[in-house]
Amino acid sequence: MNLRVKFNKKNYLKYISHLDTMRLFERAFKRAGIPVEFSQGFNPHPKFSIASPISLGLESEGEYMDIELNEEMSPEEFKSKLNQVLPKDMQILEARYSEDKKTIAALITWAKYSIEIKQENDINPEKIKESLLDWIKKDEIIIERLRKKKKKKVLKRENISDLIDGFKILNIDKNIVEVEVLLKTGSVKNLRPFDFVKALMRDNHLEGGLDLVEMKREKLLIGDKLEIF
Amino acid sequence: MINKDKLERVLKRVEKPARYIGMEQNSIAKNLDKVKVKFTFSYPDIYEVGMSHLGLHILYNLINSEKDFACERVFAPWVDMEEEMRRESLPLFTLENKEEVSNFDFLGFTLQYEMSYTNILNILDLSGIPLYSKDRDDTHPFIIAGGPCAYNPEPIADFIDFFVIGEAEELILEILNIYKEMKDTSWDRESFLKKIMKLKGVYVPKFYHVEYKEDGTIKEMNPIIEGMPEKIEKAFIEDVENMYVQDKIIVPFIETIHDRVVLEVFRGCTKGCRFCQAGMLYRPIREKSPENLMKTAKELVKSTGYDDISLSSLSTCDYSQLQFLIKNLIDEYKDERVGVSLPSLRLDSLSIDILKEIERVRKTGLTFAPEAGTQRLRDVINKGITEEDLKTAVGYAFKEGWSRVKLYFMIGLPTETDKDLLGIKEMAYDVKDIFFNRPKEEIRGNFRVTLSASCFVPKPFTPFQWVAQDSIEEFRRKSFLIKDSIKDKKIVFNYHNSELSYMEAIFARGDRRLSKLIHRAYKSGCKLDGWSEHFKFYTWIEAMEELNIDGDFYARRERELDEIFPWDFIDPGVNKKYLIREYKKAIKEETTEDCRITCNACGIEDCSMRGAIN
């Protein structure tokens, strides 16, 4: 039985990696007595997977995992038992049985991010707003990524303009820029939030490094930008 | 509390920020305004190393179990974090409440290895606490230290306000309770130290004076205050069955060295291996009952969700009820897929039966520690195993399906010759022959034997405390001798950094005059010495030259039998007469039996093991 689960990741827990998160859940399942199915073979491991692992340093209001159970358990029981043993900054929000043949990881298409960029030197809000609105309309926004070519890693130029949608400016002040955007996510095409923000800052004359940026993943979407649950 | 905004920005710029956030399962963050005594525990290395230390978990939970006390943790920051902290003027903080370490009443260090001493100075510096004990006043925390290296505390005596020597559990609570009473009255540092000085196991360096002879050895060491003990007896827990044991341990988010439940099966050791300091210091042996261990295991598995239980003790395989314990643990936890592991194995078929039991959950590695390559040298060090034992054990293991073996050795042992070194290679080849000299159908798996050779460091309170360490050149020559003699891809030989071992040997048998060396080396940039990418041997050498300190005096000098050692003022239970006897027997290649068989009169009076087998 496949249970599809939504959970969050808040505050300081944004600093634990995807692998740390997997380990955390593995132990939490044990502590809570969740009847998770194990794989066969030499080194059995619990069968669960997290969709589109989030980058280190981002909070999230909604991450998803599929978990295979070998015994029936009501989603309510699953949620309350696990939440008792999980840290308060990572809680199960919702759980539903799923008949999908595909895992949730394979279904993800887009992710919605809210991004806050602090500036140490004062900026001109009107100018920045104009620049951003022009920039987002461009046909070409280029980033450079290290890609494997044969056996080496090569710096490749990529156009990400098609991987961006729903850009909205939430607030601009003399020391802060707050925006919201949808980025293409998933196994087919994937735009990492840090790559997007680096390009945004570079092309719109926003100064400083990524340590001035606070990002949160608000939602993951499937298909034609549909909510999951 | 430190500036949280600064912390957030810094965390975004460093590797593995999760090292510095705390908040783990079973971590305890009390309201510091409501507790009477605030204690910070520090393992002076990075988070991943420190969190694997069992002592931390014991003391952390013990101290926090008292309503009026709080215990929080601090570790050495990695180089990138330290750089950020210094740049942003962010002081060192505890993980639980992100509180400045300098605001605590006590900062306690565990001394697990000598080359962590520069990290202690760095932690003090980053906390804004004066490095030298004499420069601290009533506004600073008490800087205290314990652990195995505290049995020769002298090299860092100038930095530590007082040491806790021996098993700290009961003693630390007594000390904190005395402090709790005192702080509501008018008190000062001096009067507190004078009060706790009288407790068994407490050593306050400033109340002792050391005089040296012309030749640099110690003339005498005396207390300078009336009523101070001349000899410090170690603190010791008699009743391990009923002593405090934690029912929860902190579960780190990130991967640490030991991601498992660690179960302490017994304390002490009866084997009497002559190189081993721990085996001498933690006598007499005291075992816990299997029922007690099963109960602790149950609580720890439940509160952590770990999938492995490690039975940790000095020679776990000698636990008198090992098979019974393991069988019960496997029976209890195999359905939950919680396995059992052992640090290393005794060389007999019993161990293989135990391995088979363990394998019901998860296959574990085969690790043995012959320590020396020939019977002669093994007799010298009193590691009582024979070639036959090894052959039988691996033969049996291979038959049961294992194909990889790890063998631990030391080089630089007293009376060692090249023949002994080549014996290591021969043992590896013998093991390989055993694997392959079987009918083809029986041979399964990819054979590999991994040899690991560390450099012998003579330690205080062992029969070898009089011995000179090999030179760095000798260690190198010996390592290459073994390496070059192995012409087989299936035999892997790993050797250790002899320069680091030389420094370790200096501090292991060092005296108070070395504190200025640690200070100078630290100021010149030495820290994280245990990490090969950060160990700066030439900076240490330069510091020694500048200060006119001869490292060879400490590491490479053979001692006279009547020399007074810097650690002689401590009484660990075993006496010098016994150690001298064992040293002389070693030179004559004579072995000594396990104390479970016959008592060897080591000096311990109340010993439960005396003739236990007879």
Image (spheres, rainbow, N blue to C red):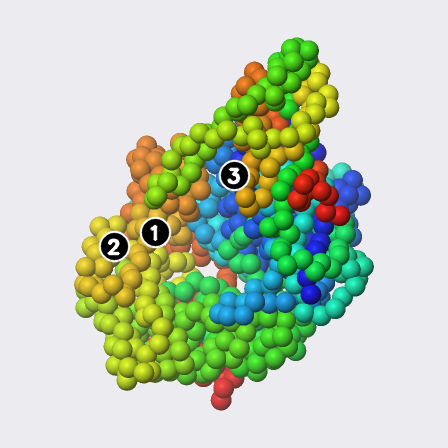
The kind of residue tagged 3 is Glu
**Residue type at the position of mark 1:** Ser
**Residue at (42, 32) in percent of width and height:** A156
Q: What's the chain of the residue with tag 1?
A: B
- Judged from the image, the secondary structure of the residue bearing numbered disc 1 is helix
**Label 2's element?**
helix
Q: Position of residue A14 (x, y in %)?
A: 64, 41
Q: Quadrant of the N terminus of chain B?
A: top right
Which residue is identified by label 1? B501
Residue A77 seen in this snapshot: yes
**Residue B393 drawn above or below residue B535:** below
Considering only order in the chain, which callout, 3 or 1, is on the residue closer to the N terminus?
Answer: 3
Give A118 or B30, whichever is nearer the viewer.
A118
Q: Residues within 10 Å of mark 2 (few under 14, many from 20)?
A: many
Structural crowding at the residue carrying mark 3, measured as other residues with C-alpha within 10 Å and reported as few (<14), some (14–19) or many (≥20): few
Q: Are marks 1 and 3 on the same chain?
A: yes
Q: Which mark is residue B15?
A: 3
Q: Which mark is residue B475?
A: 2
Q: Which amino acid, by three-letter code, is at mark 2?
A: Phe
| Residue B170 visible in the picture | no
Q: Earlier in the sequence, mark 2 or mark 1?
A: 2
The picture places residue B359, in percent across and down from the top left corner, at 50, 76
The reply to whether the C-beta atoms of the residues labelled 2 and 1 are less than 8 Å apart is yes
Give the Cα distance between marks 2 and 3.
36 Å
Residue at x-position 25% and y-position 54%:
B475
